[in-house]
Image (spheres, rainbow, N blue to C red):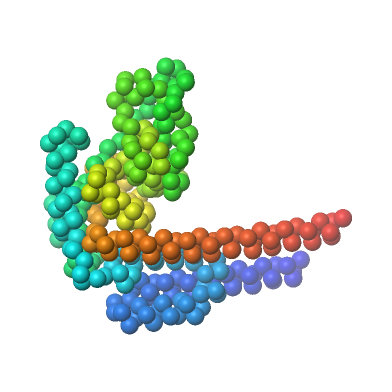
């Protein structure tokens, strides 16, 4: 028994050392201020990659570090030939103005101008800070009365709640409602590609971001971020920014027993927008990196499953 306790203590100590090594290396990478420092710390991670990223905590920290480098313009994706982000923003704002004028989307209270004190960090000169509401149309949904069978029986229209925002993509709704529910409750049917942010919910739900792969209505616990023709081009980058800001999004929630976000706070969110072509390069790199992280997680899971199976076999052999 003492031998088992000793082995467990050593394993715990080794694991703790591994997490500290990963945290220290990734923090140094994030805090690098010159290209030389970035290259040096990337080299350090590459040399010790197999050792450092052999635990789920460090793999998750790697995800967050890569996202941080991406949204601060430090993934080596700049190209001086790119059209600046300010021109892209002008085009999106102009398109949104036309959609409001023609009654396609509703006019809403304008968000405040960005103050210098609002800006959280420095971005490349070709990028531009912009509020999320300037680039998109943001709204929410509601819950049809659950006591009215006419709203749910034989329903065929997907109705999504915040509990599903843990999924990266939503392809199937947990519940379906009728056209009568949509009409009586003035629900909007949001198109494929709409991003959903959980405004409140149990545990880790608040602040989660998901993407609709179906046309669907939503409940009041979700904010729907809708894109139009020009702004659809920035959706993938915006989604990564929102995922990167998960913890900061949660921190701006109103207090109480169950802290809540609201539409106004979602609309005011700041987005560091790169030129369109650079966004494509960043998203491509992020997709590659996230795939690697997923593969690392799977490798750890497979190893632990084999280890557990082996341990159980030994125990069964001893008991029998």
Locate residue 197, reporting x and y percent. Answer: 35, 44
Numbered disc total: 0
| Residue 247 shown left or right of residue 297 in the figure | left
Locate residue 300, reporting x and y percent. Answer: 59, 63
> In this rendering, does residue 285 appear at all?
yes
- Residue at the spot x=47%, y=61% of the render? 291
The answer to whether 109 is drawn above or below residue 129 in the figure is above
Q: Who is closer to the viewer here, 51 or 83?
A: 83
The answer to whether 314 is drawn above or below residue 41 in the figure is above
Q: Who is closer to the viewer here, 188 or 52?
A: 188
In which quadrant of the rendered view does residue 241 lie?
A: bottom left
Locate residue 155, reporting x and y percent. Answer: 44, 23
- Residue at the spot x=64%, y=63% of the render? 303
Q: Who is closer to the viewer here, 160 or 274?
A: 274
The answer to whether 68 is drawn above or below residue 227 in the figure is below
In which quadrant of the rendered view does residue 6 lie?
A: bottom right
The C terminus - image quarter = bottom right
């Amino acid at each position: 028994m003492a031998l088992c306790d000793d082995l467990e203590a050593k394993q715990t100590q080794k694991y703790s050392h591994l997490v500290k090594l990963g945290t220290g290396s990734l923090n140094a990478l994030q805090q690098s201020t010159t290209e030389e420092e970035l290259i040096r710390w990337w080299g350090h991670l590459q040399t010790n990659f197999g050792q450092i990223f052999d635990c789920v905590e460090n793999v998750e920290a790697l995800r967050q570090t890569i996202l941080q480098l991406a949204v601060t313009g430090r993934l080596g994706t700049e190209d001086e030939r790119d059209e600046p982000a300010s021109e892209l923003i002008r085009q999106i704002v102009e398109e949104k103005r036309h959609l409001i004028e023609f009654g396609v989307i509703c006019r809403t209270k304008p968000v405040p101008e960005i103050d210098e004190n609002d800006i959280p960090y420095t971005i490349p000169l070709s990028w531009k800070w912009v509020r999320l509401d300037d680039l998109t149309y943001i709204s929410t949904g509601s819950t049809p009365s659950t006591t009215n069978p006419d709203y749910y029986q034989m329903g065929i229209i997907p109705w999504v709640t915040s509990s599903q925002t843990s999924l990266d993509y939503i392809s199937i709704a947990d519940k379906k409602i009728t056209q009568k529910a949509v009409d009586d409750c003035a629900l909007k049917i949001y198109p494929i590609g709409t991003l959903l942010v959980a405004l409140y919910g149990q545990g880790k739900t608040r602040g989660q971001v998901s993407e609709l792969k179906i046309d669907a209505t939503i409940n009041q616990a979700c904010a729907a971020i809708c894109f139009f023709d020009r702004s659809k081009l920035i959706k993938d980058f915006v989604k990564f920014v929102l995922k990167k800001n998960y913890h900061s999004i949660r921190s701006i929630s109103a207090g109480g027993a169950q802290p809540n976000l609201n539409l106004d706070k979602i609309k005011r969110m700041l987005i560091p927008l790169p030129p369109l072509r650079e966004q494509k390069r960043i998203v491509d790199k992020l997709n590659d990196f996230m795939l690697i992280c997923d593969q690392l997680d799977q490798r750890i899971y497979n190893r632990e499953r084999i280890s557990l199976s082996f341990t159980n076999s030994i125990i069964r052999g001893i008991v029998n």
